[in-house]
Amino acid sequence: MKFHLVFLFPLLLVGSIKQPVEMTTTDRVAFAPGGTIRLSGSVGQLNIEGWDRPEVEISLTRYTEIESLPARREEVTKELGLIHVSTTGQGSKELVISTGIPPRNPFARFFDGRTKWDLDYRIRVPRDSKLVIQHDGGDLTVYDVAGDIDVHAPHGSIMLMLPDGQYSIDAKCTLGDVYSDFDASTKPAGTRKIDVRVRSGTIKILEMERRLPTGAQHAMLPHVGS
């Protein structure tokens, strides 16, 4: 009996080895500065950064781990490809970015415990865009966006790193903490509006110039799995 146990135990370990599966797509759409960008249906890690180009760049990485079987890898790769980002309103003053996830039946194995998937968004927008974000769960970071920002999320860590300026801030977290570098006193008319609502998590509103060393250049963090 001891002889058989010595050989069966390594086999069980081999069978439990997981291999990463990852897919990244990048889309770009022309969009004039000063417009409104609406995001809905996103889930996972959402990162938004302001830049000087008159366009929006959307990179979405989907990743998971599976048993190291070639047939299973091909199947999961196809399923990851069913998660997609769509945009409407190109060329206008409003751009809508939404995430599409297939219905439960053809996608059930992603929810039954056999496969766990994650999403990582890297989105670059004209710096003075107005953001209206309905995030469905997960962490959110906004960096160097100077327009109004409206965020609603059920849970997660929300961090806004804003350029120096005058802001009217209204941030509330039902279960969790709120911190801001900016003065919460009443601001004059014409100031930028920041409205953040999270049911469970944390909210941090930080001033870029205070948080980054002089002369430092920001680079968006690589997605998980790179």
Image (spheres, rainbow, N blue to C red):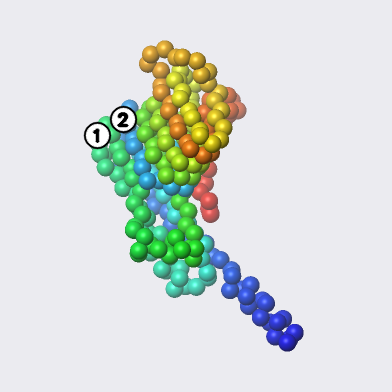
What quarter of the picture does the N terminus occupy?
A: bottom right
* Residue depicted at 25% across the width and 39% down the height: 89
Nearest the eye: 200 or 185: 200
The reply to whether callout 2 and callout 1 are in contact (CB within 8 Å) is yes
Disc 2 target residue: 35
Give the residue displayed 32% in from the left and 32% down from the top. Answer: 36
What is the x, y in percent for residue 146? 42, 26
Mark 1, secondary structure of its residue: loop
What is the distance, in whole Å, between disc 2 and disc 1 at their CAs? 8 Å
Residue position for label 1? 92
26 over 157 or under it: above or below: below
> Can you say whether 15 is above or below 149 in the image?
below
Q: In this orientation, does residue 156 appear? A: yes
Q: Nearer the viewer, residue 68 or 151?
A: 151
Three-letter code, disc 2: Gly
- Tell which residue pokes out farthest to the top in this image: 188
Q: Residue at x 35, y 64 (%)?
A: 106
Q: Position of residue 126 (x, y in %)?
A: 37, 32
Residue at left 46%, top 63%? 112
| Kind of residue sitting beneath label 1 | Ser
Q: Is residue 143 left or right of residue 133?
A: right
User: Dot 2: few (<14), some (14–19), or many (≥20) neighbours within 10 Å?
Assistant: some
Tag 1: Cα neighbours inside 10 Å, few (<14), some, or many (≥20)? few
Counting the numbered discs, the total is 2
Pinpoint residue 223: horizontal percent, then vertical percent.
51, 48
